[in-house]
Structure formats: structure tokens, C-alpha cells
Amino acid sequence: MQQFPNIMNPEDKENWVKAGKIAAEIREWSKTLIKSGAKLLDIANAIENKIREKGAIPAFPVNLSLNEIAAHYTPILNDPHVLSDQILKVDIGVCYEGAIGDTAYTVDLSGKNARLVEASQAALANVMKILKVGVTLGNIGTIVEETITSYGFQPIRNLSGHGIALYQIHTSPSIPNYNTNEKIALQKGMIIAIEPFATTGEGRIKESGEIVIYEEVSHKPIRSSIARQVIRDIENFQHVPFARRWLDEKYGVNKVSLALQQLRMNGNVQGHAPLVEISNEPVSQAEHTFLIDEEVICLTKYYY
Ligand code: CO
């Protein structure tokens, strides 16, 4: 049987349960922040501060992706976006002792995309009904695709769910959002995030726009003193993806632009550009993290 990195060590189970529970609590609480007139920057700061108050760290900067942006947008310093009539995806990652809870929801403020929101939620709910040891990746993708197309929409085929391991938000296997016919089966002990995306567009994304999320990929030495200063902060983020906003707050935008450019060229960091639906059509998302055990546990379910 193929070895996957996302098999949980049973000793860590309590931490995985706790990370998931914090993520679920914050997700539910964060819904009160999403209203017309709210600034994306205030929402991001509130959510990330709440994660830290609970004794955890953001597993990645909170993703607040509007309209045709499917994922990988987080506010910048002095971010201009204010909520009015958009469709907003809120994707929250909580890292507790390395264990990660990854969960997302969508709010439609336009009043026009309620069914689009429902489609990704229904796809996630339908997958939850069949999750167990032995279910194949092809089975999961088929259910996501059939549910979303039954609403008259398309799943986003080049975005997928994923395995999760300690301090690693994305590991194999990737969990498809359409029928790939993959025969790889879920194994006991796997931690996986299922995240269907639905769109009124074609159902593919491309990278587009300014990079606002980065990740450290190598510790190799670098000469530049500003780059060396900044990389010390990056290491304090505990090797999970970070927002350039977190650095801008401390060093200012110009210094950070220079440092990140040097760090990228030296191969220390890599950027994750916003992911935009290719036909510029609105996107919805729903996500939970699961432990595939004899009995499957939805780690980011709302518990109380
Ligand atoms: Co995820």
C-alpha cells in the first residue's frame, strides 16, 4: 500500500481535535463580522488575533477571497476592500502544536448567488455521507462533480482538497473536485481537507494579481542585511505560509518588497498568487478537515 505523509500519529490525536475545535469556533464567531460596510483588513486582523488569543497560530493568513477570486487573497496593509454586494470566501487555518484545522465557508452579500453557495455546501455534505476507509479519490471527486453540476454550476477542476500533516497544510493525496477515476483509497489515520469550489463560469482557475501570501521553502544563507532581518521574522511564523502584511506592519512596504524580492531570487521564499476563475465568474467554497478513522471524525464541525 502506498505510504502517505498525512497519516496521523495516534499520540497527536488530542492536538488534531483541539486545532479543529478552535478552527470551528472561530469560523462560527467570524460569521458575525461579515456584513456590508466591513473592511476586509479588519476582518482578517480580528480572525487572526482570535486564533492567537486561543493559544494557536494561523496555519496560513486568513484567506478572504471576493467574487471571481477562488482563494489565496489576504488583505494587504491599508487594504482598500470594503464589503458591499460581493460573494466572499472565508478560509481559516488554525495550527495548534503543529496540528491543523482547515475550514472555509462562503457568504453571498449580493443576494444573487445563494444557490451557488448552496452547491459547494451540498457537495461537501454529500461527500461527508460516504467518507470512510477504502473510499477512493475518484468516488469523492464524482460526488463533488455530480452535486455541483446538478445545481447547474461547474466544480473548479484545478483546485482540490488535500492531505494535512504536522505544520504542513498541503500534502498528498490531493482530493479531486471532479471524477478523475483515481483508484487510490482513503486509509485509516489520514487527515484530509475536503474543499469543493463551485462557479457559474468554466470551472478553472489561473494565478493572477499581486502576490500577498508567501512561504519559506529554504534556509539557505543570504547576504543582504534586510533580507536576513526579515527572514528571522519569517522563521517566527513557524514555517507555515505567511502574509506580507505581517511584515509590512513592522518594516514598511518598501523594505519588505526589497527583502521579498531578494529572498525569492535566492530561493528562500515562494509566493502564492491569487487564484482567479478564468471566466471571471463568481466562486463559492465550503471546507472541513477530517480524521479518517474506523469512525470518521469531522474535526472542524461545530461542536456545541
Ligand atoms: Co484547504
Image (tube, rainbow, N blue to C red):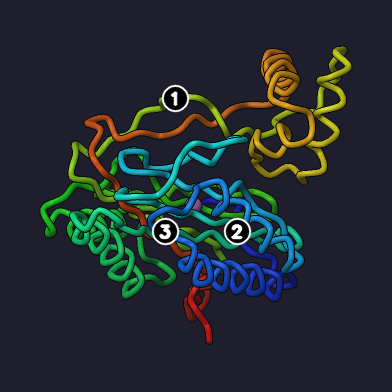
Q: CA distance from mark 3 to mark 1?
A: 26 Å
Which residue is pictured at 41% across the width and 34% down the height?
275
Which mark sits nearer the N-terminus, 3 or 1?
3
Are the two marked residues, 3 and 1, in contact with CB atoms closer than 8 angstroms? no
Q: Badge 1, how many Cα within 10 Å: few under 14, some, many 20+?
A: few
User: Where is 261 relative to 83, above or below?
Assistant: above
On residue 154, the disc is none
Please state the horizontal and vertical placement of residue 277, each as a whole percent of the image.
30, 35
> Given the image, on which type of amino acid does mark 3 rest?
Ile
Amino acid type of disc 1?
Gly
Q: Earlier in the sequence, mark 2 or mark 3?
A: 2
Q: Is residue 222 above or below residue 130?
A: above
Question: What's under tag 2, amino acid-wise?
Answer: Ile
Q: Residue 178's x, y, as percent?
A: 26, 49
Disc 3 designates what residue?
194
Q: What residue lies at 18% left-to-right and 60% top-to-bottom? A: 115
Horizontal side, residue 17 vs residue 117: left or right: right
**Element on which disc 3 rests:** strand
Which residue is more in the foreground, 252 or 3?
252
- Mark 1–mark 2 distance (CA, rounded to whole Å): 24 Å
Residue on which disc 2 sits: 47
Residue furthest bottom as drawn: 304
Task: Say few, some or many: other residues with alpha carbon within 10 Å of mark 3 (under 14 / 14 to 19 / 20 or more).
Answer: many
Circle nearer the viewer, 2 or 3: 2
SS at badge 1: loop
User: Percent from the top left, x then y, of residue 34?
Assistant: 44, 60
Residue located beneath label 1 in the image: 209
